[in-house]
Image (spheres, rainbow, N blue to C red):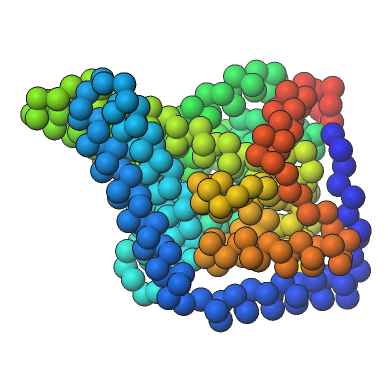
Amino acid sequence: MTARLDRELDSAELEAFGQELDALRQRTLADLGEADARYIRRVRAVVRLCCWSGRALLMLGWFPPTWLLGTLLLGLGKILENMELGHNVMHGQYDWMNDPEFAGRQYEWDIAGPADFWRHTHNHVHHTYTNVLGMDDDVGYGVVRLFPEQRWKPFYRWQPLWVTIQALLFQYAVAIQHLRLDKLVKGRISKEEVRPLARQFGAKLVRQWGKDYLVFPVLALLLGANALAVLTGNVVANLLRNLWTFLVIFCGHFTEKAAVFAPEVLEGETRGHWYLRQLRGSSNLSGGPVLHILTGNLSHQIEHHLFPDLPARRYAELAREVRLIARRYGQHYNCGSLWGQFSTVLRRIWIYRLPVVGRV
């Protein structure tokens, strides 16, 4: 794998680096206003339009044009709700609006995992310890070896299979992550600690499955429509959302030039160090507005890791300045096409399945 070529910064440069990024964040915060509020409200309206239009078309049964369009619209609505609405709102990006519908700590998204799970494992743990081995559980999600620094286990020989299953069931994989079943098996936590979390997950699962796989198929039966067509459309829409989310997240974190860090990096870590770790551990995707919206602007993963609480619609303009700052300080700005970046992810998955690469 190709190594990163970053210049090491001394303490004065690190402080200046952090100050420049802090100043950029403050300028953006000061500029937030009605345009940002209108944008997120439009996103919410588009999500509702796509979901309800898709569900209405699925009621027309197996007629190929309407079933396919209905499934795609429902899948699009679920992707937008997951990526551009739910994920960003739960980061507190729109808390300044003082609108309960866009309150980060209250929002509950249309996905199997409870929002509270994500707010802890993602917002707190991942964004605090980004790519720190042993601290950030998102590095491989416990089932994939993606860096030679990860200790090899026999389980990893079959990781192309584990990754495929994970991609198909991604919403469940990120939900189960919060249960910490690995620690339960190793005896590091008790069943009593896991039980309330399992109940919370089970309740959310019942609501999600009940809505997609019971309520709407039964409604189809009552209306004389084809319940199986509706059920299948919901299954495929959720599958599309799972695969797309997996693709975007893996391309943002595990590309060829994404870096991981030893826990020692946290000792005495300054704001400048933290920013530098976010920059080196993240990967961007090049593309147009459609790609950026569909990814929830996580195509600008670098900017998201630097400024997770700023509205994601601002990342494109922030990216221009972040790239210039990185260049001035001799840091590689990791950006590439979707398929180019994903090809390096696939290469990592294949190479690091074996013990001969890296540390055993």
Q: Quadrant of the N terminus?
A: top right
Instruction: Point out residue 69 in the picture as x, y percentages from the top left corner.
Output: 34, 32
Indicate left or right for 317 with 324 as reference: left
Res. 170 in view = no
User: Does residue 159 sit above or below 126 in this rendering?
Assistant: above
**Relative depth, front residue between 236 and 195:** 236
Please identify the quarter of the rendering in which residue 258 is found: top right
Quadrant of res 337? top right
| Residue 179, x across and y down, in percent | 46, 41
Residue sitting at 48 percent across and 49 percent down? 83
Above or below, comparing residue 10 to residue 344 in the picture: below
**Residue at 70% across, 18% down:** 157
Pick the quarter of the image with the C terminus.
top right
Viewer-side residue, 68 vs 33: 68
Nearer-the-camera pick, 88 or 154: 88
In this image, 125 relative to 38: left or right?
Answer: right
Residue 166 position (above or below residue 121): above
On the question of residue 100 being in view, the answer is yes
Residue 85 screen position, x and y as percent = 42, 55
The location of residue 9, given as percent across then percent down, is: 89, 65
Q: Is residue 116 left or right of residue 322?
A: left
Total of numbered circles in the picture?
0
At 73% from the left and 48% from the top, the residue drawn is 335
